[in-house]
Amino acid sequence: MHFIPEKLDDYVVAHSENEPELLQQLTRDTFRKILQPRMSSGPYQGRVLSMISKLINPKYILEIGTFTGYSTLCLAEGLQPSGTLDTIDTNEELFDFQREFFDKSEYGSQINQHLGNALEIIPQLNKTFDLVFIDADKDNYVNYFNLIIDRMNPGGIILSDNVLWSGKVIEVLNPKDKMTKAVLEYNTLLKEDKRVETVVLPIRDGLTISRKL
């Protein structure tokens, strides 16, 4: 969705960093082979994720929700040489597709894939994280936050995707709409929790940056 006029949005994209060739190939293959390809972060948001990661220069990254691995590779661009990125997803059918592109990149050896329930996998990771990206099932966003907040290093950053939920966050809530309700609850949590400071960026479907105090 566009929060500014489309022509101005096109100008923003045209004057931002170009999408790397490998990610162009990943985008093409995602649209050719994978259902719901628009779930991918896309080139502009991908460059935003890359820039944030490079500014942080994290040693340990956690990603909740891999999909085809586009955002994974963008985040990996900022990793320290000795750093690692753990990415978690429930879709077994995408595992080999992700790995193919991870291994084509220069970050393949630093990316650890985990298949299963993130709420069960995260407690098994013996790390404290500098950067976390949440882009999975919205009804568990609050649970993910509560699970990772004490596993963040001071000053660590949590990025949360889809926090504007196609604009539904400002519409009258349908009592049957559990996903929108979950996003609203999560946004309120980020605003009120004293352990973080938060800003919402109106990028695509909304991206929140929360810094652990």
Image: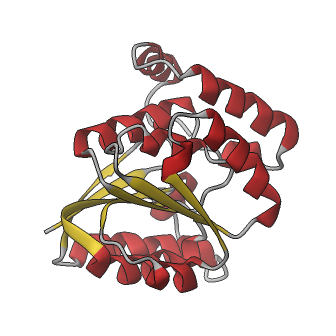
Q: Residue at coordinates 60% horizontally, 73% vertically from top-left?
A: 179
Q: Which residue is found at the position 18% from the left and 76% from the top?
A: 195
Vertical side of 203 occupied by 182: above or below: below
Residue 185 x %, y %: 42, 78
Image location (x, y in percent) of residue 47: 44, 32
Which is nearer the eye, 155 or 113?
Answer: 113
For the image, the number of numbered tags is 0
Q: Where on the picture, by quarter, is residue 17?
A: top left
184 left or right of 200?
Answer: right
- Judge whether 8 appears above or below 168 on screen: above
Depth check: give the residue in front, 72 or 11: 72
Closest to the observer: 150 or 167? Answer: 150
The percent position of residue 28, horizontal first and vertical second, equals 75, 28
The N terminus sits in image quarter: top right
> Where in the figure is residue 125, as x and y percent of width and height?
44, 77
Tell whether 79 sits left or right of 20: left
Q: Quadrant of the C terminus?
A: bottom left
Q: In the picture shown, does residue 125 fall above or below 22? A: below
Q: From the viewer's perspective, is 3 left or right of 208?
A: right
Relative horizontal placement of residue 187, taking residue 197 as reference (left or right): right
Q: Is residue 173 visible?
A: no
Does residue 149 appear in the picture of this structure? Answer: yes
Q: Is residue 198 above or below residue 110?
A: below
Way the structure is coloured: secondary structure
Q: Residue at x 83, y 49 (%)?
A: 35
